[in-house]
Every structure is written in C-alpha cells, then in structure tokens.
Image (tube, rainbow, N blue to C red):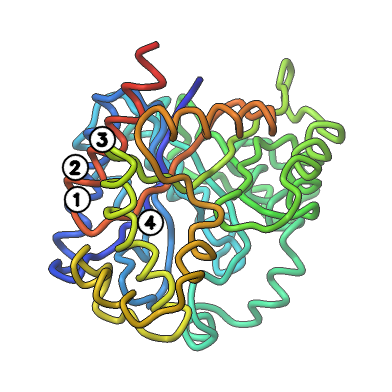
Amino acid sequence: MRLSILDQAPISSNQTAAEALRESMELAQAAEELGYIRYWIAEHHDLPGLACSAPEVMLGYIGANTIKIRIGSGAVLLPHYKPYKVAELYNMLATLFPGRIDVGIGRAPGGSAEATNALSDNFLQQVWNMPSSVKDLLYFLDNTIPPEHPHAKVSASPVPTVAPIPWLLGTSKKSALLAAENGLSYAFGQFMSDQDGFEIIQLYRNHFKPRKPDQVPEVILTVSAICAETSEKAMDVALSSLVWGLQRKRGEGQEGVPSIQKAKEYFQNEREDLLGEMRQGIIIGNPHEVAQSIQELQDKYNADEIMIVTITHSPLDRIQSYKLISEEILSK
C-alpha cells in the first residue's frame, strides 16, 4: 500500500502561526523518514486555526528541508488565479526540486465570501470556466500550447527537466469527469464528502482518456485518521479535532485546536449522541484498528494510494499517529 499525507497546517491553541508552519515542515521531514511517498499542504484563506494561505511558499521551505519525498499543493484553488502564473510557480519549484513536485488543483474558494472577493473578481464565473482553465494550465505544464492559442508565444519559464505532475482534487462526479477527460490523476476527498465515492471513482476510471502515452488512471483516496497506542488514547487525542470541528461549525474555535483537557470540558455540556455523530467519517483507534479500516477503504474504492489528514492539539501526537500507521501498514 502507498501512503501519503495531506497537511492542513492547523494552529493549536498554544501556538503561533509561525510555530504551526514550522511543525508542518517537521511533519514533512518525519513523513519522509517514515516511508510516506507524498506530502501535500492545503490552501486556505483567512480561516481561523489554519496557517497556510500560500502552498507555493511553504513548498519552497519544505523542499529545501527534505530530500526525496514528493511535495505538492492540496490544492491550488485555480479559480482565484491565472493558469499561466500557477504553471510558472510550480515549474519554478520543479526546477529547484526535480522529480518531486505535484500540482493539486481544486475549485473551492478556500475561505469566506469576503476573502474570496478580496482574492479575485468574478469567482463564480471562474468556477464556470474551470474546464478551460484546467486545459490552459496543462498546456503550460506540458509545454504543448497549440499554435492557435492566444498565449502560444509564451512559455511558463523556467521549464524544468521533469515537469510537475498535475492532479485534480474533488468530491463529485463533475470533478471526476473533468479529471478523466483531461488525463489527470484524481484525488477523491473522502474525509470531506458524503457522496458515493465508489461510484465517483469508477466514473473517473471508466471515462479516463490518456493525455500522454502509457498513461493510466491513478486514484488517491484522502481519509481522516487519528491513531494512538490504545483505542482509549486515540479517542482522547481525537477529541481536540472533533471539538474544534464543532466549534468552527458554530462560528467558535477562533483560538485554534483546543487541548485534550479543554476539549473534554467542552463536551461536558453536550448531548451524548453528538460525539458519535462527529466521529462519522474519521478513523480513530489503535494501530491494528486504523490499519484494518484503511485497508478496507482501499479495497472498497480500489484506490492506488491512501492520503491521510490528521489534526491533533499536540504536534507530537500528530507525528506519533502517522508513525504508528506507517509501522503497522508499511512494515508488513
């Protein structure tokens, strides 16, 4: 099984944004040592408790402090940007770190309506234009701009010796078909979807059209997981993330991911069924339990790779979770 990491760069209640971003770099270093093949970092805008608004900046920092792990965006929110500029940024990264760069592409706003308006004009129109923007981005990344294209006379320099690998991230049939029609690898966000992922992934595989010779469909399944030495400890560690998710849903959680103790105090006044409701979609348990659940998901979805997102209050608990999962799955 291939394992990788999606990092949302969470800020804990006792951290500054600078400390959280340094922890992201150290997570990528740990991932490389533990045998994870890929590390992606997400893009969010003016969302309390999430530190990374510019993955391309973090990837330069992370690439310089790692050796071989693939690194990329999870995702570039393309409707905010011109495809040419995105291609320039990731070609630059691929020039600095040859054979290691991925470009994950998404269509979400990544923040509030106010942040979206501050970032770009006509966002909804650019979402509508997403298929055209994806094609343009691929022309620049593949260096295959047709002569009749209005930008045929420019290239996204520097042109690297090994091009970045583009992925499309999504949770819908629309995103699956867009990936398939453009010969893109596809990352399905199971951790943030209530859709039938099996049907969506099969739709992608059935409609895949190779963009290059010998290209085959490739699927990453992204899941949320928290692992600890025992099931009881895993549940304690997971409380911070669960409570923070609830607080954000209620417009709270401005101070970041709470400590386990604060999370337990928060739950004292909540309905008993709320915890079970919040746990849906998150894998929580000891190494055997988590590995078994991940294996079942891989089998169900026929995924080529499992990407794991883990949010905890303590950076040590987060790295330990990834360590236990890798030891249980990759060492056997």
Sequence-first disc among 4 and 2 = 4
Crowding at mark 3 (Cα within 10 Å: few <14, some 14-19, many 20+): some
The residue labelled by disc 4 is 8
| Quadrant of the image occupied by residue 289 | top left
**Which circle, 2 or 1, is nearer the viewer?**
1
- Residue at 58%, 35% in the rendered image: 220
Determine contact: label 4, label 2, CB under 8 Å.
no
Query: What secondary structure is marked by label 2?
Result: helix
Amino acid type, callout 3: Glu
Q: Amino acid at mark 1?
A: Pro
Does residue 100 appear left or right of residue 281 in this picture? left
Task: Give the CA separation, mark 1 to mark 4.
Answer: 13 Å
Q: CA distance from mark 2 to mark 1?
A: 9 Å
Q: Quadrant of residue 259?
A: bottom left
**Circle on res. 315:** 1
Q: Residue at x 38, y 56 (%)?
A: 8
Q: Are marks 4 and 3 in contact (CB under 8 Å)?
A: no
The span from disc 4 to disc 3 (Cα, nearest Å) is 24 Å
Circle nearer the viewer, 1 or 3: 3
Which residue is more in the foreground, 188 or 94? 188
Q: Nearer the viewer, mark 4 or mark 3?
A: 3
